[in-house]
Image: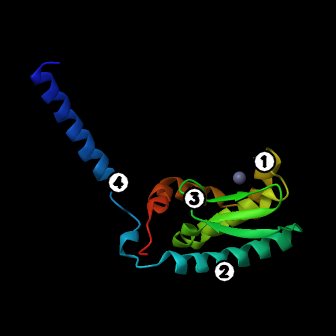
Amino acid sequence: MSRGEVEHVLREKRAWIAEERRRQVPRLGLERLAVSESEARVGARELVSALAQEEAEQLGVTYRRIRIGGQRTLWGSCSPSGTLSFNWRLVLAPVEVLDYVVVHEVCHLRHLDHSQRFWRLVEQRRPGWRDQRDWLRENGPELLAFKASE
Ligand SMILES: [Zn+2]
């Protein structure tokens, strides 16, 4: 590449980087939150446990235990042995979003897959679940990137 070509590419890249930066401006205002991870985990466990217990009772299913984790890629999971895992950062999301993730995982206690039967059950339990899924798609990356003050 000639020097001129190199400079041209760099200029284009700079514009691209600036554009990416602009798009990644935090929208949730999380940077203002002075919450420690241990506080957030305690809050997440309380909320998640209450919601999971209520939903499991309604569905007539049982789980073995609840794990609160800090995965950078995952909101929740349900293991075949009945352990429900949730990301503590959910406590920073709107409560309907946290509620949806909990209900989603509790529904997996009945159907451990993403089959039509599974989604029908989710739909029945939380008819507005798509809004929460969309919220997670939109804001999830920022939430997952959040670092607590501790
Ligand atoms: Zn699922």
- Of the image marks 1 and 2, the number of the one nearer the N terminus: 2
Q: Which mark is residue 113?
A: 1
Q: Nearer the viewer, mark 4 or mark 3?
A: 3
Label 1, label 4: how far apart the Cα atoms are = 33 Å
Q: Which residue is mark 3?
A: 71
Q: Quadrant of residue 95?
A: bottom right
Kind of residue at disc 1:
Asp
List x then y, in percent, for residue 140: 51, 57
For marks 4 and 3, the one nearer the N-term is: 4
| Residue at mark 4: C-beta within 8 A of ligand 1 | no
Mark 1 or mark 4: name the one nearer the start of the chain: 4
The residue singled out by tag 2 in the image is: 46
Q: In the figure, residue 107 lies in which quadrant?
A: bottom right
Say few, some or many: other residues with alpha carbon within 10 Å of mark 4 (under 14 / 14 to 19 / 20 or more). few
Q: Residue furthest right?
A: 60
Q: Residues within 10 Å of mark 1 (few under 14, many from 20)?
A: few
Residue at (62% x, 55% y) in the render: 130
Mark with earlier residue (2, 3): 2
Q: Secondary structure at mark 1?
A: loop
Q: Are marks 1 and 2 in contact (CB under 8 Å)?
A: no
The amino acid type, in three-letter code, at marker 2 is Glu
What distance separates the C-alpha of mark 2 from that of mark 3? 19 Å
Task: Locate the N terminus and report the quarter of the image it occupies.
Answer: top left
Q: Amino acid at mark 3?
A: Gln
Label 1 vs label 2: CA separation?
26 Å
Task: Single out the mark in the foreground, 2 or 3.
Answer: 3
The residue tagged 4 is: 24
